[in-house]
Image (spheres, rainbow, N blue to C red):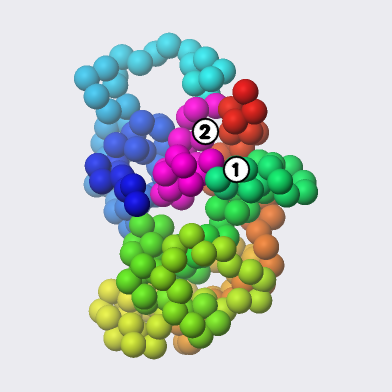
């Protein structure tokens, strides 16, 4: 499976906003976009041209891909799924991305970033309704209970994250319980629940060209 292996801080600088790809580091003065608030590369500081319509659409699509950490082919599949569902395609797309297991693990507070959440899932540290699920793209459903595997709770990193769960805000469509190291899907996310800096209608326009 294809995987981005370069510096993720370059992605934030390219998009011009914090994508919070490195967890807690993004909240410190070590954050690259705070230290170098311009695009990477030798021409990064000289880019001043007004972007075209295509450029705006591309940036929104790339931003969404990079926030959720998925590659182009998979992102296109999500768009096709969203276009077949009832309702607005853009909102359907973001709802599908939010329902990914790695994102839910991050949202509940079991990980400091989606990349770390993906690692926990693929390494078998997460269960859904008591059964281990190691597929990061698994789409959660209403009523499912996501928890840290009992054997994994002794890990110093996971224990540290569980201890700080209470300090993290959880979206209204999820609930979290640090005592049982679990969370429950109360409902499917609405657009108001998805607090990310994306204008999804530009993504729809790009794929509808």
Q: Is residue 198 above or below residue 180?
A: above
Categorize mark 2 by other alpha carbons within 10 Å: few (<14), some (14-19), many (20+). Answer: many
The location of residue 95, given as percent across then percent down, is 63, 53
Q: Secondary structure at mark 1?
A: helix
The residue at 40%/83% (across/down) is 149
State the predominant SS element of the stretch in magenta: helix
The residue pinned by badge 1 equals: 79
Q: Position of residue 126 (x, y in %)?
A: 42, 76
Occupied quadrant, residue 41: top left
According to the picture, the residue beneath numbered tag 2 turns out to be 60
The answer to whether residue 11 is seen in the rendering is: yes
Residue with the most extreme top position = 49
Residue at 42%, 37% (x, y): give it: 17
Q: Secondary structure at mark 2?
A: helix
Residues marked 1 and 2 touching at CB (< 8 Å): no
Is residue 59 in the magenta section?
yes
Percent coordinates x, y for residue 130 in the rendering: 51, 85
Residue 125: mark: none
Mark 1 or mark 2: which is in front? Answer: 1
**Residue shown at 64%/48% (left/top)?**
81
Give the left or right position of residue 171, taking residue 25 as reference: right
- Which region of the structure is painted magenta? 57-76
Which sits in the foreground, 77 or 172? 77
Q: Residues within 10 Å of mark 1 (few under 14, many from 20)?
A: many
């Amino acid at each position: 499976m294809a995987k981005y292996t370069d510096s993720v801080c370059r992605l934030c600088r390219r998009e011009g906003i914090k994508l919070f790809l490195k967890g807690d580091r993004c909240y410190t003065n070590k954050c690259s976009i705070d230290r170098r608030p311009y695009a990477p590369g030798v021409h990064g500081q000289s880019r001043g041209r007004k972007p075209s319509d295509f450029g705006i659409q591309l940036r929104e699509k790339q931003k969404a891909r990079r926030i959720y950490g998925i590659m182009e082919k998979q992102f296109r599949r999500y768009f096709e799924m969203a276009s077949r569902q009832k309702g607005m395609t853009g909102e359907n797309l973001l709802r599908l991305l939010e329902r990914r297991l790695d994102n839910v693990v991050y949202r509940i507070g079991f990980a400091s970033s989606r990349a770390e959440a993906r690692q926990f899932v693929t390494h078998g540290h997460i269960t859904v309704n008591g059964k281990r699920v190691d597929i990061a793209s698994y789409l959660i459903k209403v009523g499912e209970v996501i928890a840290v595997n009992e054997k994994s709770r002794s890990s110093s990193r996971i224990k540290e994250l569980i201890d700080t769960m209470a300090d993290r805000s959880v979206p209204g469509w999820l609930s979290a319980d640090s005592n049982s190291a679990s969370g429950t899907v109360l409902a499917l996310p609405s657009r108001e629940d998805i607090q990310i800096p994306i204008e999804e209608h530009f993504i729809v326009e790009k794929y509808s060209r």
